[in-house]
Image (cartoon, coloured by chain):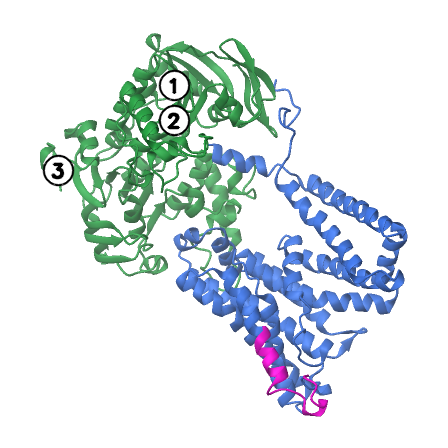
Chain colours: A blue, B green
Amino acid sequence: MTKYFKMTARSDCSKREAAIIRSSAIVLSLVAAGVFILIIGHNPLAVYWSMLDGAFGTAYRITETMRRAVPLVIASLGIAVAFRLKFWNIGADGQIMMGALGASYFALNHGNMHPLLLLPVMALAGILCGGIWGAIPAFFRAKFRTNETIFTLMMNYIALKIITYLQYGPWKDPAAMGFPKIPGFSQNAVLPDVLGLHAGWIIALVLTALMHVYIIYTKRGFEVMVTGESENTSRYAGMNVSRIIIVTIFISGGICGLAGMIEASAVNKTLSVDITKGAGYTAIITCWLAGLRAPAIPVVCVLFAAMIQGGTFIQMAFQMPQSAAQILQGLILFFVLGSEFFIRYRLTPAGKSIIQQDGE
Amino acid sequence: MAGISKSFGEVKANVNITFSVNYGEIYALLGENGAGKSTLMNILSGVYTPDSGSIYIRGREKKFTSPSDSIAAGIGMIHQHFKLIEVMSAMENIIIGQDHSFFISKKKLRRVINTVSEKYGFNIDPDKKISDMSVGEKQTVEILKVLYRGADILILDEPTAVLTPQETAKLFSILNRMKERCAIIIITHKLNEVMEISDRISVLRKGKVAGTVHTRETGPMELTRLMVDRQVDLSIEKPPVSASEQVLQVEKLCVTGSDGIPALTDVSFSVRSGEIMGVAGVAGSGQRELCESLQGLQKIKSGSIKFQGREIVGCSPREIIELGLRISFIPEDRLGMGLVPTMNMIDNVMLKDYYRGKGPFPDRETARKRAGNIVKAFNVHTPGIEHSVSKLSGGNIQKVLLGREIGSNPDFLVTAYPTRGLDIGSSHLIYDELNRQKKKGVGILYVGEDLAVLMSLCDRILIMYEGRVNGIVDPESVTIEDIGLLMMGADTRTVKGASL
């Protein structure tokens, strides 16, 4: 009985309460960061305003913020589907790199192909490479119950080193006069702009809708949810647990791979070791903040990107060191993530009642 | 305890509860599930703090803000699920977290434990590892643990739930010996045990004290009335077996458990249609593996399982369904296997046949109708079929599961502990439903733990011991004690009326 009781008690945090907790966390984070800003000798309000200005002040800045948000959105969608399965895929960074690698192979070797053919081929290659990179740890998890957290993490380093090898070795640009870089893509391999931003944003939005439908409404999504809740239930219901794990993580990795293709094609226009800019890790935070809900992911990612973009801007505007801007970001994140604890648990001073209610 | 109240959100778990326990007596707290017994005990052991009311021990008011306060006041709680460390010995478990000196004198400790054991009639080897112990022994260690802490008020939460009749008798004799020096509170919903062991009884109903009585002056009928506020027919119906064709035939079934140790060895039996075959046994004797084997959920080493003459060994759960065999399964672990607690009733209803039909989307409309039907047919108390199943009470959760499994018109029904944790009212509802299925000609395998229920519900009882069939008996021709002996591994030939 106690078991059921605790579960009911935990869910008594209403949506309204949760919203209050979350927004007060943001306010508190601004206050705490404000103290820090005062200490280093600036006006907090001016700094905050400038962060907003830096992120959304001009059309160009908005575009830049969105440019940062696109890979975050796509990678978050990929991670979210894995997390629904309670498969802790922290290998998104590696999957993005491998996706970029697959796309780059075609971009570099078939640069004169027509864009209408080349771009889809690159996208497919990106999905396939990212997907396989995810499916490898998924296979071992499904068949031998290996720990996917360590496995996917290690796969990141392997991916990184493969690209390093290519950059310094076989794929090194002979025209760069010994400088270790991979040649730029031909114009055919570059994703075109739509409304001032590369077409990746359309892909991100379409993918958001697709993943929402996939998880919430389809049979496959149902399997993912059930298996994520309990593998025993999944087996009981006649589902093929191994297949579900491998296929789902292939999809997860494939989506991350697509993010890699977009970054390589539209943003970097080449492949390099810092192609991901840590998006695969940041996306873990954003997808978690979005509560794994696809529709919330773009919102969270844009806010997150704005924070990073605004942070970069205040470095210039106030001649602040980069580390100071990062402390601000860290403080804000600390409060926002920390508030999740208060949504799930209630802290009361010992000896006092939890709810001031007299039982008639 | 005087005027104790406690609410969780909108749920009033305890309302103005007052009772007193004397040293030298065994006091029973009786109540259905959700009556507030566990909340009350958690308050007494310092896990929860009451919203109002006071606790007095030896006449002095005590405020507990943490379990350690409660321990300091001499209260020792023995939980239903033991809190012991499996890889450590009894002695280590007893002293863990309590001995503040850096070095431990094992010799001295062993002497202390042996003295205490002798005094109360425990029979325990201080150096035996918990993992090598039987359930009864583990319970003894739990009791020793709280005694070692200096407790003289013992609270036992459902102490007999996992014990065999013999172990229960032993526990009761220990408790009777201990009550000279302690106050003992047992929490239970088993009427006969309350009648046997307690001196006084408080019955809780919906968080309130429905009555406090002296055991000598009451009887099961009055207690039931106090518990459920209405008369309940305590007898279980047993309609005769009508049809007699065999539905299930298991032969020489061998299964290796997840730890590599044989979980089932040469299990053979058969069940006819319209027959309830009971399965008794100490927890972990292979019941779970047996049930799961019948569903295609276990890897089978050797042997055969035939349903309506068709071999299902080697089939996956879905292949069994595709064969056209309608086998329903109500697993022991309702929320970890039978249902998805975070999902609503609609999704839970379609758990087993979501994949049917064309297209990428499951047929949620049919599932919605079926969920509605289950709510009506089984009188499920739910705020709505859109609410997650975890928010329902234990009895209603079981109704959802039963409703889904019976709703698929099974030919065979496997149920594992279907009434575990349910109150008397809900349990009888389940028994009635099983009997209704039986009359329809469904073969039923009923894995249970309450031997009295097994005796009155089942046509035959199969007793498992260490993964083997240690006798199949006709409940009419054996006693509960006979079954207890077989559960403990007694030779089948020594028990009259038992066969293999």
What segment carries the magenta color? A160-181
Residue located beneath label 1 in the image: B224
Q: Is A78 rendered above or below residue A115?
A: above
**Residue B309 seen in render:** no
According to the picture, the residue beneath numbered tag 2 turns out to be B424
Q: Is residue A131 left or right of residue B453?
A: right
Q: Foreground: B424 or B107? A: B107
Regarding mark 3 in the picture, which secondary structure is present there?
helix
Q: Residues within 10 Å of mark 3 (few under 14, many from 20)?
A: many
Is mark 2 in CB contact (under 8 Å) with mark 1?
Answer: yes
Q: Amino acid at mark 1?
A: Thr
Residue at mark 2 to residue at mark 3: CA–CA distance? 33 Å
B47 horizontally vs B134: left or right: right
Q: Amino acid at mark 2?
A: Ile
Inspect the image, locate mark 3, and give the three-letter code of the amino acid beneath it.
Thr
Residue at the spot of label 3: B492
User: Can you tell which quarter of the image residue A321 is in?
Assistant: bottom right
In which quadrant of the rendered view does residue B495 lie?
top left
Total numbered labels placed on residues in the image? 3
Of the residues under marks 3 and 1, which one precedes in the sequence? 1
